[in-house]
Amino acid sequence: DGGITQSPKYLFRKEGQNVTLSCEQNLNHDAMYWYRQDPGQGLRLIYYSQIVNDFQKGDIAEGYSVSREKKESFPLTVTSAQKNPTAFYLCASSIVQGGYNQPQHFGDGTRLSIL
Amino acid sequence: DQQVKQNSPSLSVQEGRISILNCDYTNSMFDYFLWYKKYPAEGPTFLISISSIKDKNEDGRFTVFLNKSAKHLSLHIVPSQPGDSAVYFCAAKGGSTGGGNKLTFGTGTQLKVEL
C-alpha cells in the first residue's frame, strides 16, 4: 500500500545526543515536510523540501537539520542544540502541482522523549 | 502570531446530531483551507478542503463553509457518529507561509460524540 512510514514510533534521547527520525514515502510525492506537535498546540513546521537536494526552514528550524538525498526519504535530525525536543514529530508529503492545491498526507508520527 | 485560530478547545455532541467546528483566520492571502482529523498517537488524516473561490464544499457527511469577508470557516458533520470523536485541525495555505503547500494549522478542537 502507498503511504508514509515514520520510524521509530517512540524514541528516547539522552541529554547532549543527536537523534535522527526517519520518514519514507512511496507515494511519488515531490514535497515533504516535518512538523512538531506539542500538547494543546497545533502543528508547527520545522523544515520542508519541494525537490531532491533542496529544503527550506520552516517556522521553528533552530536545533534541527534535514537532508533530502532521495525523493522517497526526508530524515530529521534533532540536535543537542534543540533545548526542548520532547514532542510528537509528524512527517508529511504532497504533490507539487503548479496552480492546483493538493492536501498533505501524514505519517503516524514519532514521539521523542528525553531521558 | 496565531494566524489560524480554533477558539473552542472542545465540543460535545450527541450521536445523530450536527457537529459544527469553527475556525477563524487573520491572513487575507490564504487561498486554500483544509480540515484534518486526528486520533491520539496517529498522524492527521485529511478530511475535506475548500478553495477561496468557493463558499461551500461537500463530501458525504462533511461540509465545509467559507466566509471570506468574515475570515471564517466551519466544518459541519451530519449526522455525527461516535467514530467521529477525535481532534479536528483547521489549516490554511498561502499568504506569508510561502511556497509549495506550506500549511498553517490551528490548535485543534476535541470533538466528543456521545451515545
Image: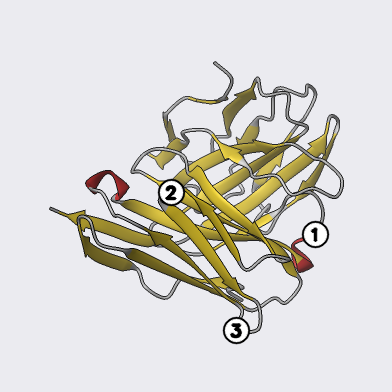
Judge the density around disc 3: few (<14), some (14-19), many (≥20) Cα neighbours within 10 Å: few
The quadrant of the rendering that contains the N terminus of chain A is top right
Task: Using the rendered image of the protein, determine whether residue A38 is visible from the camera's viewpoint.
Answer: no
Q: Amino acid at mark 3?
A: Ala
Of labels 3 and 2, the one closer to you: 3
Q: Amino acid at mark 2?
A: Lys
Q: Are marks 2 and 1 on the same chain?
A: yes
Q: Chain of mark 1?
A: B
Q: Dots 3 and 2: beta carbons under 8 Å?
A: no
Measured in 3D between alpha carbons, the distance from the residue under mark 3 to the one under mark 1, in whole angstroms, is: 23 Å
The residue closer to the viewer here, B14 or B40, is B14
Q: Quadrant of residue B20?
A: bottom left
Query: Is A25 placed left or right of A10 in the picture?
Result: right
Q: Earlier in the sequence, mark 2 or mark 1?
A: 2
Q: Earlier in the sequence, mark 3 or mark 2?
A: 2
Q: Which mark is residue B70?
A: 3
Residue indicated by mark 1: B98
Question: Could you tell me residue A74's position as x and y percent?
Answer: 69, 30
Residue indicated by mark 2: B37
**Of helix, strand and loop, which one carries label 1?**
loop
Q: Residue at x 85, y 50 (%)?
A: A99
Q: Chain of mark 2?
A: B
Question: Could you tell me residue B110's position as x and y percent?
Answer: 32, 59
Image coloring type: secondary structure
How many marks overall? 3
**Of helix, strand and loop, which one carries label 2?**
strand
Query: Is B95 placed left or right of A115 in the picture?
Result: right
Measured in 3D between alpha carbons, the distance from the residue under mark 2 to the one under mark 1, in whole angstroms, is: 24 Å
**Of helix, strand and loop, which one carries label 3?**
loop
Measured in 3D between alpha carbons, the distance from the residue under mark 3 to the one under mark 2, in whole angstroms, is: 24 Å
Q: Amino acid at mark 1?
A: Gly
